[in-house]
Image: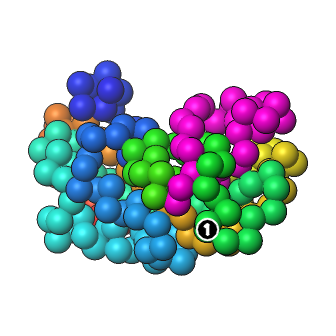
Amino acid sequence: MVVSGRVEMGQMITGFAPGVFPVSSVLQLPFTWNTALEGSLVANDLFRKGFLDETLRKDVKMMAMNITVPLKIWTKKPVSSLEGLKGLRLRVAGGLDIKTADALGAAPVSMPLPEVFPALEKGVLDGGLYSFESTAIFRYAEAAKYVMDVPAGYAVGMFIMNKKIWDSLPKETQTVLDDLSVI
């Protein structure tokens, strides 16, 4: 919608658009960083140096990128090793998270966040990859009480502006926004 100009600015999570930003998916690789700040600094540095997807330069004006806190593996039953994940149905966002769950021997399930808690309660899911924040907000920890404290993945957020809108702004406004931007 930002690219087409239907909205002037927006935020997106790359995991919900698998294949659109293939190079940026490297930022989601598990076991990469320990904090959101560390990941965000690396992501913005890679963007500034031109290492991320060209789409982010030609179609939109990148305002900022952020990496979430590491996603942890939450389960309904205690799991003491990665081998214990084999066959468990884990909710993942999509994209690289599907491959991560597959590599761990789990059965990845993509579903919208609001559907996760009932699926955990009914036994449709055995757990999932979530941040501590989302387990509190969406009450996942009430149903999946056990957590493996490993950085199993990340979400990559992008704040973008329509390129034509950006180009139409006065140079002084662009300068102020660039000075405020992380990129």
Pick whichever, 36 or 161, lies toward us.
Answer: 36
Any part of residue 51 in sight: yes
Residue topped by disc 1:
82
Q: Residue at x 66, y 48 (%)?
A: 88
Q: Quadrant of residue 178?
A: bottom left
Q: Quadrant of residue 3?
A: top left
Q: Which colouring convention does the figure follow? A: rainbow
Q: Is residue 32 covered in magenta?
A: no
Region in magenta: 104-130
Q: Residue at x 32, y 62 (%)?
A: 26
Residue 43 picture location, percent across and down: 34, 67
Residue 153 picture location, percent across and down: 50, 61
* Extreme residue in the top direction: 6
* Extreme residue in the right direction: 142
Density class for disc 1 (Cα within 10 Å; few <14, some 14-19, many ≥20) is few
In the shown orientation, is residue 117 left or right of residue 88?
right
Any part of residue 57 in sight: no
Q: Which amino acid does the dot numbered 1 rest on? A: Leu
